[in-house]
Image (cartoon, rainbow, N blue to C red):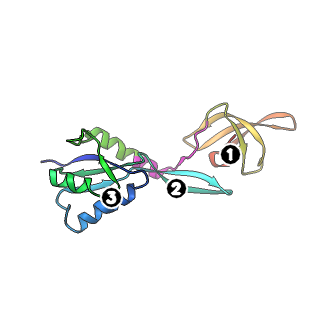
Amino acid sequence: MSHKWYVIHTLTGQEDRVKASIESKITEGILKDNVFQVLIPTEQVSEVKDGKKRISQRKFFPGYVLVEMDLNDDLWYSIRNIPGVTGFIGTKAKPTPLLDSEVNHIIKQTEERKEKPTPKVIFENGDSVKIIEGPFVNFSGTVEEVNPDKGKIKVTVSIFGRATPVEMEYWQVEKL
């Protein structure tokens, strides 16, 4: 039997508790021969609160935990009975494993997003924004250009009655 990745559905907000329960059962030796990895895909997200830039973790798939394992009936039963687990993805009788390509894509995304925090808010051309940080604080403007790779946007603000383009970082503005 070869090990595959399965998706466990959890109650919202219970992902970390379910992961910890599975890992403690591995440590206790109950699941150690059948479970190889437990993963909650996350990304780093940047935002500004109270004028301070903060980096936090956000789950890609809230309510889901990925587990690499050799699934058998005992293991299926053991995991199903962990508090917070509502079931497996698949049919009621048989969980469906993820394809290798799906798992590789998720792991790659997780690795990439650990390196570079993504903004919590996504901006588009034409959005109205208020500048909350920097020399143009409290000015309002319109997004003219978005550069997500650099986390910067070009905002046109009216200064002395003239439309002036100003380059800002994502965290320096908020949507109106």
Specify whether residue 111 is painted magenta.
yes
For the residue labelled by badge 2, is the local secondary structure a helix, a strand or a loop? strand
Measured Cα–Cα span from mark 2 to mark 1: 18 Å
Direction top: furthest residue: 126
Q: Residue at the location (31% across, 39% down)?
A: 102
- Residue holding disc 2: 56
State which tag comes first along the sequence, 2 or 3. 2
- Residue holding disc 3: 83
Q: Amino acid at mark 1?
A: Val
Residue 66 in the image: state x and y as whole percent.
31, 49
Q: Residue 91: name its quadrant.
A: top left
Q: Is residue 22 left or right of residue 123?
A: left
Q: Relative to 8, is 28 above or below?
A: below
Q: Relative to 131, is 33 above or below?
A: below
- Magenta residues, start to end: 110-123
Label 1 environment density (alpha carbons within 10 Å; few <14, some 14–19, many ≥20) = many
Residue 173: give its label: 1
Measured Cα–Cα span from mark 2 to mark 3: 26 Å
Q: Nearer the viewer, residue 82 or 99?
A: 82
Q: Amino acid at mark 2?
A: Ser
